[in-house]
Amino acid sequence: MGVMKWLVTSVFLCISSQVAAQSGFELSQFSATSKTVFLKWTRYVGAESYRISTALTSSPNDTIGFVLFGPNTLLGSISYLSQGVEYIFTVEALDGSQRVLSSASINATTAPDRMDPIQTIKPKNSKTLIVEFNLKNGVSQYIIRVEDKQGFFREDRVSSSPAEITNLTPYTEYTLSIMAVSSAGRSQPSTPVTGKTVLPPPQFFTSSPTNDSIVVSWAPVDNAVQYTVSIHKFGFNTEIKYNTSDTNLTVSGLEAGLLYMIKSSAWDPIGRNGEDSLYKNQTTRPPAPSSVNVSVVMNDTFAGLAVSWELEKQVYGYFEYHVISEQNVTCNTTSTSCILPVGCGELHTFQVIASNEAGPSYPSIPVVFITFPCPPEFLAHAPSSDGNCTLTWNRVPYADKYEAFIKTGDGSEENCNTTSNNCTYRCLCGHTYLMSVLAFNEAGSSPHGKVINYTTVPCCPENVAVSAVSTDTLEITWTASLGAELYETTAADALEVILCNDTAPVCALSDLSCDRAYSVVVTPCNDISGCNRACKAHTKDTAPCAPSNLQLTLQNSTVSVSWTANNRKANYTVTADGDGVRHICTTSGNSCNITDLSCGSIYEFSVSAASAAGPSLPSYTKSHETEPCCPMNITVDQVTEAMTNVTWSQAKGAHSFITSLTSPRGHARCHTQDSHCLMGCITCGTNYSVTMETYSPSGHMSTCTYQGFSSSPCCPSGVKLYRTTDNSFQVYWRSTGGQHSIIAELLGSNNSYNCTALPGQNSCSIGNIQCGDVFHVIVAPLTVEGKKILFCPQRLYSVTCLGSSIGTVIYRGKRSLD
């Protein structure tokens, strides 16, 4: 290669005042064209200039050119190179004396030569152009530059021809040029050529308003003067095209329920057909279903209508069917049958509509159907006196006949078929009947309706027994009756009604009035049917009323008892209880006498009545105290000449005593609660009558009379003692004139002496008295029995001795004898 003159075609200054760390001098390729290579290097401290030299890699030592750069230039280029040739480039850092401070080398290849212009440009669609160009050896890639008049600029890399330029704007003119690309860089752009995209496809919409037509509509496409719509029936090879300048098209005469594929395109003013749209599927609406059939289906919990139908021809795609009725009963399904939940007693007119994505078909021919009847309502029963019952109900629409079912508690069942609205059946007391009614028509039977319970009134009890358990209480027993849950027992007379409710077959009616005839009825009841008021009554009398107003009248040991009696017919018993003994009298009247009552006792009197119905309660009791008893024995002992001691035995019922000794010459009396008393003022030698009054604590008195009492004879008075001859004494006294002998006693300390005088005498002699003693001299009368009266007074004498004879007799006084 000859000597070439090198020109610096481009210098890129990198001005920097920074000092880089000294870590080596580096060189790299920035870019390359078919004639020029751009290099960059790092700053080297102390360099005053940089020199780039180049040589072919095949002759690295033969420099074919160089370029100098100032100290601040770090990017430079060498031009006028050959395209597609590999060179070695060296950068040297030089000081002010042009000495090399450091150097670095790199191999680089120039880019390819400029491409030939693009050969052809044709549109693929509204956004894509297909370009064809001549390929270049040694080139791995190409860059197609795309521009338009609105400033759009884009470069697309392609690897072969033809190539597609995508994502363009429809119906737009573009300028295109091409560049070759190798590892060294790209070539210069080729001469530009122009190309234009076509119109975009219309954005259309389809619908099927009927089962034999399709409507296609779209928005206008800018710059379009005509449109083409193509329709292809699925499964067939034929295609029909329609041209129009409108923006909608109706295609008729199509088959129902088939799939049609539709596309469209727009034409520009110069007659170019634009991009075809994608196919859009559109089915025509389906044909109307035919052969609609309706039947009843039922199970234990569901009642419905089965509706089925057919389509007369094969159709395409997914279908849904809608079954409708004017009763607002609907069903949606994809099969050709449907079960509708319907009610009883309904009149339906059914139609079936087929639907697909295009819309519904015409309705099928209407089918009228009457559903099974509703169960009869308002079931009621009416018992009759002959043991038959009648079941009634309301008629229901669309029912041809009825069947009644009557089931008893024991499981037996009776059926009744009728076209009317009632049935008669045999019904017994105490039974529960379950009754229901079904209605029938051609569609079948009604659902099971309400089941009503009818419980007949309980049966009347048998073996009813009424007994009196007390004066005001009746006990009623009976045999439990069928169907009874509760028994209402009443006892009624003209004035009152007594009621008892119990679940047991026994009842006690208390607080009844006495001496009444009651009508007793046992009425069986239950909660459902109430009470059987037709049961037999039983008559029972209550016990007599207790006598009242008890009165007692005492007559000696007899008490007359009277009372008020209010009974119709009764016998009365009077009892008197006291001292453990009961006295009784009976009568049919209202008074009675109780005799032989004991003295000194308290008796409880009561009266009771009795009749065939039983005894009454006793009357209230009254107490009566009999007179106290008289003491059985009374003793009167004379204590002194003027005083007696009276004692007596115990007297029943006596609380205090008044004892009296009475005589014409006077009387003595004492009042005591003791059984003895001491009475003075007694006259000697007098006959007394003895009486006593006994008093009970309540003041009752008895007068008691006893054998008389005679006081002791009177004691002689004026007693004197005279000495006589022969050591004897003569005792003198004043005569009492009584009928009693007199005894005179001399009671000494050593000896005692006495003498006796006959009645009427007033002295007696006592001989052989021993002197020198003190004597108590007592002169007392003798009783009939010869006993001495002991309470006569004593006289005290002392007798002295004169020698062996009695000396003087000295009276020392008078004293009573203790």
Image (spheres, grey):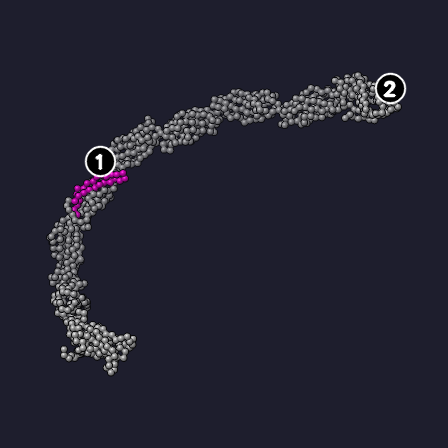
Nearer to us of marks 1 and 2 is: 2
The residue at the point 34 percent across, 30 percent down is 431
Q: Earlier in the sequence, mark 1 or mark 2?
A: 1
Three-letter code, disc 2: Asp
Residue 311 image offset from top left, x and y in percent: 16, 44
The residue lying toward the viewer, choosing from 255 and 217, is 255
Question: Residue 735 is drawn in which quadrant?
Answer: top right
Residue 791 image offset from top left, x and y in percent: 76, 23
Q: Which mark is residue 717?
A: none
Residue farthest to the right? 803
The residue at the point 79 percent across, 19 percent down is 742
The answer to whether residue 34 is seen in the rendering is no
The answer to whether residue 708 is left or right of residue 45 is right
Q: Which residue is mark 2?
A: 726
Three-letter code, disc 1: Glu
Q: Which range is magenta?
A: 286-311
Mark 2 is surrounded, within 10 Å at the Cα level, by few (under 14), some (14 to 19) or many (20 or more) other residues, namely: few
The residue lying toward the viewer, choosing from 215 and 332, is 332
Q: Quadrant of the C terminus?
A: top right
Q: Which mark is residue 442?
A: 1
The answer to whether residue 328 is left or right of residue 85 is right
